[in-house]
Amino acid sequence: MLCMSEKRLAKLMKGSALASQILDSAREKIATIRQKTGVTPCLATVLVGDDESSAVYVRMKRKRCDDVGMTSLLIKLPRETTTDTLVAEVTKLANDASVHGILIQHPVPRSVDKRAAFETIPLLKDVDGVTSEAMGRLILGMPAFPACTPAGIMRLLIDHNVEFDGAHAVVIGRSPIIGRPMASMLINVHATVTLCHSRTRDLPDIVRQADILIAAVGKSRFVQGDWIKEGAIVVDAGYNVGNVGDVDFEAAMERAGMITPVPGGVGPMTIATLIEQTADAAVEQLGISL
Ligand code: NAP
């Protein structure tokens, strides 16, 4: 009798399952904060311009706030907003004691100096780790809220018992919101990290060495299946048109040990981390212990 050998497929690391646990515990924390202080934690989101994807992300974040009993405030500004106006709006939120976390939705129009706006967020309200102080603290291993997407990825990897110590982690993408903080987080847990970008030579050969691969490129199915080392842990942070990630998922499934799906992998972890960090920011600002 002919015996067909079955293909071994990667195990899925589902962010949606872990994210709902995080949101459940955030809901309890928010209820306790309200009970102890009478204050409801509040996340303020600033949305500049009319980017359709950004509007969808903001709606999803506000829906999650509602789900856990957190107040969400939306400041919508037109595309032609100047840096001075944006800085003035963020300053108002910085000085408003009823606001505990401030998020400036990416991307902001090119005409605006986004760094100036980010730096206006006080460290305690910087729940997405965008200020230079929060990033510097992350690099030095000092306390601050880290960027939500890489923090959510770390949480997912830890939940799946991934070994970091001495592992070779390859991060593709060096943006301030994903690649750079991701590399710092992996260094802090003793991985050996290679950070790749558009000028990197021989990218497929570098990726083939990765025990842990984080793809944050913003290009549909960019990472090919035959770049992936057998048994590697693959995290796809990409979210491109048509709900497609940065990794050729079907091909990667046949080589990786574990892989995140798109959607349902990194995305839900980002939002859950944002909500959790805003609740924690409220605890710190209200000076209570839970
Ligand atoms: P980004 O700012 O555009 O950065 C992309 C990075 O990829 C850059 O560092 C760029 O290199 C690098 N890159 C571009 N082409 C490359 C190539 N051919 N080879 C190697 N590296 C290359 O993007 P981002 O904001 O980090 O987002 C990345 C992806 O994550 C996007 O799909 C985005 O939608 C997604 N995202 C997901 C979430 C979530 O919660 N799931 C959150 C945020 C973003 P250079 O620096 O040299 O230009």
Image (cartoon, grey):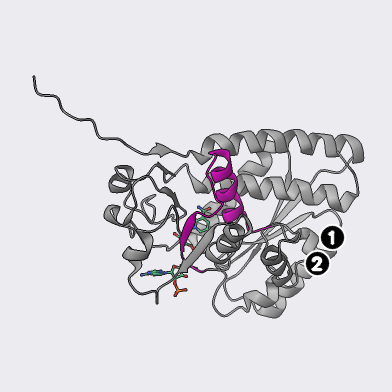
Marks 1 and 2, how far apart at CA: 6 Å
Q: Amino acid under label 1?
A: Asp
Q: Are marks 1 and 2 in contact (CB under 8 Å)?
A: yes
Q: How many marks?
A: 2
| Image spot of residue 133 (x, y percent) | 74, 70
| Residue interval drawn in magenta | 146-174
Q: Secondary structure at mark 2?
A: helix
- Name the foreground residue: 219 vs 63: 219
Q: Residue at x 81, y 43 (%)?
A: 40
Q: Residue 206, how many percent across, how many down?
A: 37, 64
In the picture, measured across the screen, residue 155 lies left or right of residue 230, that is right
Residue 167 colored in magenta in the image: yes
Residue 39 in magenta? Answer: no
Instruction: Spot the residue most to the top.
Output: 1
Q: Is residue 104 visible?
A: yes
Residue at the extreme left: 1
Q: Which residue is mark 2?
A: 92
